[in-house]
Image: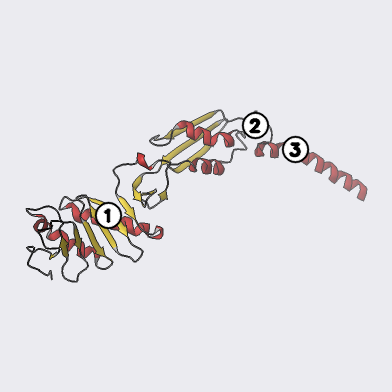
Amino acid sequence: MTGGLLVKFLAWGIALGIVTLPIIGVLSGRFAADRWPVRSLQLKAEFAHVDADQIRGAVAAEAGKGFFALDLKRLRADVMALPWVGRVDASKHWPDTLKLTVFEQLPYARWGGDRLVSASGKLFSVPDMSTVQGLPQLDGPDDRVADVLAFHVRCVRQFSSSRLLVRAVRLSDRGGWHVLLDNDVVIEVGSENTDARLQRLTEVWSQIAAGREAPAAIDLRYENGFSVRWNEPAEPTSTQAGATPTTPINKA
């Protein structure tokens, strides 16, 4: 009786192996990939920086395993490894179709010397930074990227009333903010009361710039005022905000 049961179990095991091994082989892509191949790739993308050939090359190895063995998670990772790719949606459709939607990274600004940053705060690198023009320059510790983006937005809003553009924003390791305007004015904002300091400057900007070239530098790190420095050798090196070059004025 025991021997008979053993024979039956062995027979069932062999039969199960005969059925399951081909299925495992198909799903793993070890064989029969040519019987259920991926014949159609439906691709949607902007193609501003990534072209279709790059994407096809990235999916070729995984798609070559066949419809059943194709691993969508691994395929997404392969496409995400391409420069400029920000997100990938992928799906399989019976009997032989792979659908891909590729979203490119949208750079908001340059970050440091060799990277870009998106509006969502994602840092990424591209092969040729010279192809990216017209973006503001941001810099700071990588773990403070969200703070730098938010401060840049506030600066842009503050200076828009004066029709000034913010070319660069930098956050130092000590937490001090530095701003460069499009007219080459360097602004030391400091680390405290930044919004109030910027507003104080924009309120009197028209007086500072009236009838003369823009100043070289402005230091907002004063309790009730700020200093302005011009490059003109005949002018004093610094004045208080809202004043003539020789008369200091404090802002309450």
Quarter of the image holding residue 186?
Answer: bottom left
Residue 187 position in % (x across, y down):
22, 59
**Residue type of the residue flagged with mark 3:** Val
Quarter of the rendering occupied by the C terminus: bottom left
Where does label 1 land, which residue?
153
3D distance between C-alphas at marks 2 and 3: 18 Å
| Left or right: residue 122 compared with residue 226 | right
Q: Residue furthest front?
A: 233
Instruction: Residue at 58% x, 41% y: name it.
Output: 71
Secondary element at tag 2: loop
Q: Which of 246 and 116 lies nearest the eye of the viewer?
A: 246
Q: Which of 12 and 45 lies nearest the eye of the viewer?
A: 45
Where does label 3 land, which residue?
19
Secondary element at tag 3: helix
Residue 139 position in % (x across, y down):
34, 55
3D distance between C-alphas at marks 1 and 2: 52 Å
Where does label 2 land, which residue?
33
